[in-house]
Image (cartoon, coloured by chain):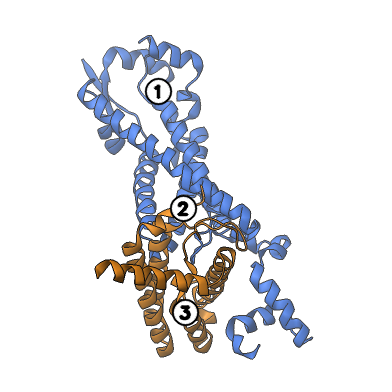
Chain colours: A orange, B blue
């Protein structure tokens, strides 16, 4: 029974990967998703941290919503089997360990999700001090994942 | 018979302990990340200021701070290995360590100015290079920290070794500036007794080092002839997109506009 269940989960997982397209496409999509998030992160950084005099509530809220949207989009589907090698917009930096560290990956992914959604909530209030703190937490969650499964520049 | 002499002047000691503290803090803030990464950047600029100060002080500071006094020339290293070296400041091996540390810290700080963390941090001079080069320099920044950690470990091991095996306390002189040495040795070196540096030289070193740090922290981008390359990549792109929509917008106004009202796009 347990074996059958595992098998079903595996099939479901590979089906998700199949839906997300071939390896190169998955890598390209996820690189795009993070680039889009990076643009929105840079907007918040600029308006909340570096140049608070340029703060615009709507702009920051829109950026935070965009980051949350990326986080909530089900990025996991873009990490199918074999996507630790391949060229999207450029060579992927996913470590092969990704596939052995499922539990830790789930943990850091959830942390990012929660942090991003909380940021969207806080951004809507316009409380810049709280936004700054929560923005830092999102950054920490990015770093946790990078440290775990992203190949560093050497 | 022992006599107490002045070895390390006050600026030298301040430099040393501020450097130790800020390198430790820079390491921790980099590891923690998040909000702290901005402090990592500030500490890096501060460390740059300290390094420049030390280099200037190596030329105009008091005797034992000067590079000419302790520079590890081949003949000095050779005589130290043979056990013939006599002196009271940095011995030739210590001097090698000093220069190794200064150079590695220079690489660390120099690369850090152009680095990025692919999250929300860019070094103050990031916009002077393109992203690929910044990534490359970030890689060097990530690698050379290991060299630095190795040298720091060696530095600490040497302190323990001198304390235990040679019964020499290296830490105390770095705190008090004073060192007890045999009278014979003191008389032998009294011919070229330590020259003092004074307030004016200290002020000069401070001005030079803070100017460099200010420039590296982004001050250089405020110089008029450099403003062209200081516009961040994305602002330029969006600014030109914005200008095509409203012809009368000045670059500054467009930049403001893009920062404040993306919804109008």
User: Same chain, marks 3 and 1?
Assistant: no
Q: Chain of mark 3?
A: A
Instruction: Depth check: give the residue in front, B86 or B164.
Output: B164
Write down the residue under mark 3: A73
Q: Chain of mark 1?
A: B
Q: Evaluate whether residue A104 shows in this view.
A: yes
The answer to whether residue B258 is above or below residue B208 is below
Write down the residue under mark 1: B93
User: Same chain, marks 1 and 2?
Assistant: yes
Q: Evaluate whether residue B251 shows in this view.
A: no
The answer to whether residue B75 is above or below residue A56 is above
Q: Chain of mark 2?
A: B
- For disc 3, the neighbor class at 10 Å (few under 14, some 14 to 19, many from 20) is few
How far from the left and from the top, in percent, is residue B27?
37, 51
How far from the left and from the top, in percent, is residue B49?
49, 49
In-image side of A100 versus B202 (left or right): left
Instruction: Give the SS element for disc 3.
Output: loop
Q: Residue at x 44, y 54 (%)?
A: A96
Disc sitting over residue B44 in the figure: 2
Q: Residue at x 45, y 49 (%)?
A: B47
Check the picture and name the quadrant holding the N terminus of chain B. Answer: top left
How far from the left and from the top, in percent, is residue A92?
54, 58
Q: Residue at x 20, y 24 (%)?
A: B164
- Using the rendered view, name the quadrant where residue B76 is placed: top left
Marks 1 and 2 sit apart, C-alpha to C-alpha, by 27 Å
Instruction: Depth check: give the residue in front, B168 or A36.
Output: A36
Marks 3 and 2 sit apart, C-alpha to C-alpha, by 37 Å
Instruction: Give the SS element for disc 1.
Output: helix
User: Same chain, marks 3 and 2?
Assistant: no
Disc sitting over residue B227 in the figure: none
């Amino acid at each position: 029974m347990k074996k059958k269940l595992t098998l079903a989960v595996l099939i479901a997982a590979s089906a998700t990967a199949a839906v997300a397209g071939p390896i190169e496409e998955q890598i390209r999509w996820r690189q795009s998703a993070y680039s889009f998030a990076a643009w929105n992160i840079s907007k918040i950084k600029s308006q909340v941290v570096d140049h608070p005099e340029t703060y615009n509530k709507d702009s920051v809220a829109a950026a935070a919503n965009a980051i949350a949207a990326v986080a909530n989009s089900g990025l996991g589907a873009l990490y199918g089997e074999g996507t630790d090698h391949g060229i999207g917009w450029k060579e992927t930096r996913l470590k092969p360990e990704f596939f052995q560290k499922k539990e830790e990956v789930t943990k850091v992914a959830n942390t990012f999700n929660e942090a991003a959604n909380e940021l969207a909530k806080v951004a809507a209030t316009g409380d810049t001090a709280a936004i700054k703190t929560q923005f830092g937490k999102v950054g920490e969650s990015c770093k946790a994942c990078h440290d775990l499964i992203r190949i560093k520049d050497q | 018979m022992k006599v107490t002499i002045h070895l390390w002047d006050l600026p030298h000691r301040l430099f040393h302990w501020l450097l130790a503290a800020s390198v430790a803090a820079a390491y921790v803030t980099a590891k923690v990340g998040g909000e702290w990464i901005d402090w990592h950047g500030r500490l890096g600029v501060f460390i740059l200021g300290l390094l420049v100060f030390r280099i200037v002080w190596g030329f105009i500071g008091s005797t034992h701070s000067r590079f000419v006094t302790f520079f590890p020339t081949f003949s000095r290293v050779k005589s130290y290995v043979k056990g013939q070296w006599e002196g009271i400041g940095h011995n030739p091996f210590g001097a090698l360590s000093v220069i190794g540390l200064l150079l590695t810290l220079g690489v660390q700080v120099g690369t850090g100015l152009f680095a990025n963390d692919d999250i929300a941090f860019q070094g103050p001079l990031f916009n002077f290079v393109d992203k690929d080069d910044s990534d490359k320099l970030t890689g060097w920044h990530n690698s050379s920290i290991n060299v630095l950690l190795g040298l720091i470990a060696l530095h600490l091991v040497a302190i323990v070794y001198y304390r235990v095996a040679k019964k020499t306390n290296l830490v105390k002189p770095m705190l008090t500036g004073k060192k007890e040495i045999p009278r014979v040795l003191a008389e032998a070196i009294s011919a070229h007794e330590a020259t003092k540096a004074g307030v004016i030289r200290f002020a000069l070193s401070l001005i030079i080092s803070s100017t460099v740090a200010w420039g590296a922290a982004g001050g250089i981008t405020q110089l008029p002839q450099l403003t062209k390359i200081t516009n961040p990549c994305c602002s330029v792109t969006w600014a030109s997109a914005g200008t095509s929509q409203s012809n009368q917008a000045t670059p500054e106004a467009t930049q403001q506009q893009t920062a404040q009202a993306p919804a109008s796009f």
